[in-house]
Amino acid sequence: MVDEWQDVSLLEYEFLKELLDGDNNFVVGSPAQSIYGWRRAHYDALAERFRRDFPHAGTIVLQRNCRSTRQIVEAATSLVPNAYSEARMEPEKGDGPPVEVHIAYDPDSEADLAAQLLERYHEEEGLRHQHTAVLFRQWRQSPAIERGLTARGIPYTLADRFTFYKRAEVREILSYLILARAMRHSRPAEEDDSGALETVINVPPRGIGPNSPHRLRAEQPYLTWRLSFAGMVRPDLREQVRKSCIELFELLATLSHQVDDVPPERMVQEVVERTGYRTWLEEDFGAGRSVYAVEALQKEAASHGSTAAFLRAIRARMRARLDSRPGDQGVTLSSIHGAKGLEWPLVIVVGLYEGSLPHVMARNGGATKDPPR
């Protein structure tokens, strides 16, 4: 049996034919879900070749939908091109509430609208958060949704992803801001921020190995900027480590002179530029870190009057996180593709605008398509 038949190229088909055993074959696929034209998967040519090579093959069309209500099936069917008649489903589940369409004019207002709807269903209908989901086409859309949910204290989990505030790039940039303020006010990092220096001491890489932070800490519970800067003259450390400590001192000193005097979004930009963080990410050395998450953090910072207020708000949000509360794991955030085969009583799909869904590449002469799932 071969699954996802519509994504098989003619070259792959020739290979598969060598494995096929007579007429005892079964292939499963749908032209409505063909999305790999860019890698030479052309369903029409494949179907013609298959019918020629296996003239006695029969066709079983699956058109019964056992998961969704009539309203959902009809709404989805209305979006499927007429050429894909086999994608039109017959609902078995019966009637349900109508599909609602809400209009928002930017990602932040859309996120707030989604949060309002989830809040309404939770409070008025008693629907638990873990029974709801927000779906989007691209993961770069998730930070705005996360900010909207966090602002209203709504717990959430990301399917196979880190939550926004736990992402490495977010923690690292916030750590630089925390350390800059600590130096500005001549105080060690507060207990809440005790991991800030160890988070960024070698990010982006500056020649400090994994054992050096332990030696710099000198049996203290955590590494402070004072201990780090003492390393500038410690003879028991390698010259490269001492040099890197000096460079980090100079970097934080520069940032500390600005941290209370420029808008927080400008400080995020200063951290990204002065540390070489953006270049590091753009050269693809960031081990899965994303420029989009950095831009989302900068946008969030712009909603606060100062860097101090921004950091206070982040701490408050982290303390208020409810996603670990027993009995409710929170709203699921997932890409549409990643949600295939899953179901929830309430689903909100965001980002339904031209260029996103369908994706802009779906309009470039049919080289690729978004599957109308």
Image: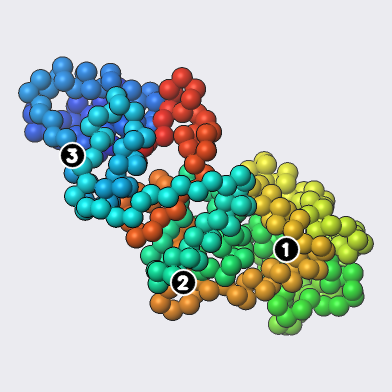
Query: Distance of mark 1 from mark 3, alpha carbons?
Result: 51 Å
Is label 1 in a helix, a strand or a loop? helix
Mark earlier in primary sequence (2, 3): 3
Provide residue 301's location: percent of width, then percent of height. Answer: 74, 58
Which residue is denoted by mark 3 in the rendering? 62
Which amino acid, by three-letter code, is at mark 3? Leu
| Image quarter (top left, top right, bottom left or bottom right) of the N terminus | top left
Q: Nearer the viewer, residue 366 or 151?
A: 151
Q: Where 328 sits versus 15, above or below?
A: below
Which amino acid, by three-letter code, is at mark 1? Leu
Disc 2 vs disc 1: which is toward the camera? 2
Disc 2 vs disc 3: which is toward the camera? 2
Is label 3 in a helix, a strand or a loop? loop
* Residue at 26% across, 25% down: 13
Query: Distance of mark 2 from mark 1, alpha carbons?
Result: 34 Å
Mark 3 closeness class: few <14, some 14–19, many ≥20 residues within 10 Å: few
Which residue is denoted by mark 2 in the rendering? 123
Contact (Cβ within 8 Å) of mark 1 with mark 3: no
Mark earlier in primary sequence (2, 1): 2
Q: Nearer the viewer, residue 332 or 205?
A: 332
Provide residue 41's location: percent of width, then percent of height. Answer: 35, 26
**Can see residue 322?**
yes
Which residue is denoted by mark 1 in the rendering? 174
Query: Distance of mark 2 from mark 3, alpha carbons?
Result: 38 Å
Which amino acid, by three-letter code, is at mark 2? Glu
Provide residue 245's location: percent of width, then percent of height. Answer: 83, 63
Find residue 28 and report its image quarter.
top left
* Residue at 28% across, 20% down: 44
Disc 1 vs disc 3: which is toward the camera? 3
**Can see residue 198?**
no
* Residue at 64% across, 70% down: 317
* Residue at 71% across, 82% down: 221
